[in-house]
Amino acid sequence: MLNRRHLRVKVLQSLYAYHQSRSGDIKQHEKNLLQGVDKVYEMYIWMLSLISEVAGYADVDAQDRANKHLPTAEDLNADVKILSNRFILSLQKNKEFLAGKKKYKVAWDFEPELIKTLFSNLKKSEEYTAYLGKTGDTLHSDKDIIKHIFKKVILKSSLAEQVFEDMFIYWPVDKDVLQALIAKTFKNFAYDNPVENKLAEVTGNWEEDREFIVSLFEETIRYNDEYQALITAKTQNWEPDRIAMIDTLLMKMAIAEFINFSSIPVKVTINEYLEISKEFSTPKSNSFINGILDKILIELKSENKINKVGRGLIEE
């Protein structure tokens, strides 16, 4: 699921788009921010659907083999055991999944070769052969072959990778979140009764998380000039055009958290943005951002602008 670091990245992406855009429509960019989170869930539904389609292709494959000009005995008796896979059957009856498919208009008709190729790769695997030969299956053992389809067939496919990259602009960034959502789904699907099996949630508490990202986005923009002045005062020896825009945005977001988010510890804020900078900015950004934020924090403390409460108390 999306944790707070992932959510901060979503805000960073939206702030970058806002500053790069000629449109100053904050509400539109805020709407895009929320849609960015929803896109992660949409990607999740598409992936679950793809897993189901790959398993379901066993039926098409069996029919194709039986309809050969000179089918062998094996062709006429293709094993379609996976069609009765407990995880797949439960997923296909899941109301959340069905609602998601309807909402996002999920259908893989536009990529028939993808499903065929993925199933072909599955058929060649030792794991699938072992699955077909296994008896006494349970929901737990049925999930094992589905995990194999996801991890070793779909995620290892360059064709599937390209399809998802084309469909979802932030696929490279959100891919790890997707894997966590799928893993959570395997854990959640623990009951033989499909009604008891639930999909993963995109965040731990969407009501709180929604308020967090919207507030962080709005506060960073509202006090942009003030935060820029703080940064400029501490970077006088740096030419402005040499400071990466991402670094500036990360520092402004951190300052917004210092001042406006009383329940988030200062150390947590600093650590989060330093970690984000490692992935999204330059190799030297980490130490640069850390140094500037330390100086800004000292100034803000001296002016009594940092007021943390509860678990967010500043450690002296």
Image: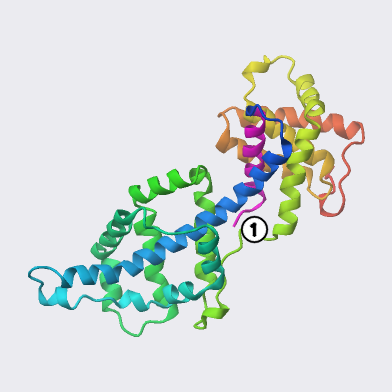
Of 135 and 164, which appears nearest the observer? 164
Q: Residue at x 62, y 29 (%)?
A: 285
Indicate the position of residue 201 as horizontal and vertical percent values: 61, 63
Residue at the spot 83% in from the left edge and 42% down from the top edge: 260
Residue 313 percent location from the top left of the image: 85, 48
x, y percent for residue 199: 56, 68
Residue type, mark 1 in image = Thr
Judge whether 271 appears above or below 119 on screen.
above
- How many numbered discs, if any? 1
Q: Is residue 56 left or right of residue 232?
A: left
- The residue at the point 54 percent across, 60 percent down is 181
The C terminus is located in which quarter? top right
Q: Nearer the viewer, residue 302 or 71?
A: 71
Residue denoted by label 1? 203
**Residue at x 37% of width, y 63% of height:** 149
Comparing 41 with 242, the one in front is 41
Q: Residue 315: within the magenta?
A: no
Residue extending farthest to the left is: 70
Q: Where is residue 270 in the image (x, y as percent from the top left)?
A: 72, 39
Which type of secondary structure does the marked residue at label 1 adopt? Answer: loop
Does the magenta-highlighted stretch encompass residue 3? yes
* Predominant SS of the magenta segment: helix
Q: Is 62 placed above or below 39 here?
A: below
Residue closer to the observer: 17 or 188: 17
Q: Quarter of the image containing the N terminus?
A: bottom right
How was this image coloured? rainbow
257 sits left or right of 136 in the view: right
Report the side of 31 relative to 57 (left or right): right
At label 1, counting other C-alpha atoms closer than 10 Å, the crowd grade (few under 14, some 14-19, many 20 or more) is some
Write down the region rendered in magenta: 1-19
Name the side, left or right, on which 117 lies relative to 253: left
